[in-house]
Amino acid sequence: MADPHIQSELDILDKLTVLLYRTALTAAAGIMSIVAWEIEMGTTALVIAAILATTTVHIYDKRFRWLILGSALFAVIWLLSGLWTPLALGAALFSFSALAIKEYFCFQLKPLLLTPLALAGFWFCLVFNQAQISIAFSMTGAILLAVAAFSKWRMPMHYDIGDKSKYQI
C-alpha cells in the first residue's frame, strides 16, 4: 500500500493508470446497481471493469497483485469461452472483493470489509435463482464499491502510487 507521505514524480503512464483504475472502480459500482436485472450485459461489463481495474491497480506486493489479476484474467477467458458465464462473473466479483479489501487498508473504512460478503451473496443468490435477494446484495455491493470509488477520487493521485522503489516486479 502506498505511503501518502511519499510523493513520487508521476509520469503520464502513472497518471493514466490511476485514472483508469479509479474509473473502473466507479464503473463497477454503477454496473453492480443494474447487473441483477441485466445479467448478460452486466456480466460482460463487470469482467471488462475487473480486467481494467486489476491491470492498473498499484499494489507493492506482487503475490496479491497477481492473485487479483489472475482472477480477472480467468474471468475474461471464461467469458470468451462461452461456457457457464456465472463463473466468469464470480471471478470478476472476486477481483472487486479483493480490491475492496485493499481499499479498506488504504482508507480504514470498516464497511468496505462487507464488500466480499455482499458480492458473494449476490453471486450465490443469482446462481440459485433468488432474484429478490440478489437485488438486495447487488445494491449493497454497488453502494460499497461506490464508497471505495468516491474515497479514491477525493485523494491526490500520488497517494495511489506511493514509493515507486517498493514495487515488486
Image (cartoon, rainbow, N blue to C red):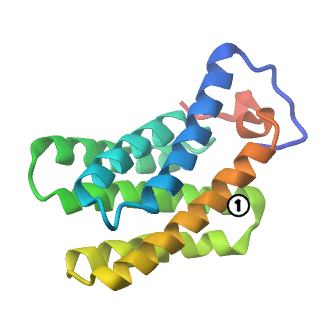
Judging depth in this view, the residue of 133 and 115 nearest the camera is 133
Q: Quadrant of residue 104?
A: bottom right
Residue found at x 70% / y 60% = 105
Q: Give the x, y percent position of residue 117.
A: 47, 77
* Total count of labels: 1
Neighbour tally class for label 1: few under 14, some 14-19, many 20 plus, Cα within 10 Å: some
Specify the amino acid type for callout 1: Phe
Judging depth in this view, the residue of 23 and 112 nearest the camera is 23
Instruction: Return the residue found at the far top.
Output: 12
Secondary structure beneath disc 1?
A: helix
Q: Say if 68 sits above or below 57 in the image.
A: below
Q: Give the x, y percent position of residue 45.
A: 35, 46
Residue found at x 74% / y 53% = 151
Residue found at x 29% / y 59% = 38
Q: Quadrant of residue 19?
A: top right
Q: Say if 101 sits above or below 154 in the image.
A: below
Q: Say if 4 sits above or below 126 in the image.
A: above
Q: Quadrant of residue 49?
A: top left
Residue occupied by mark 1: 105
Residue found at x 50% / y 41% = 53
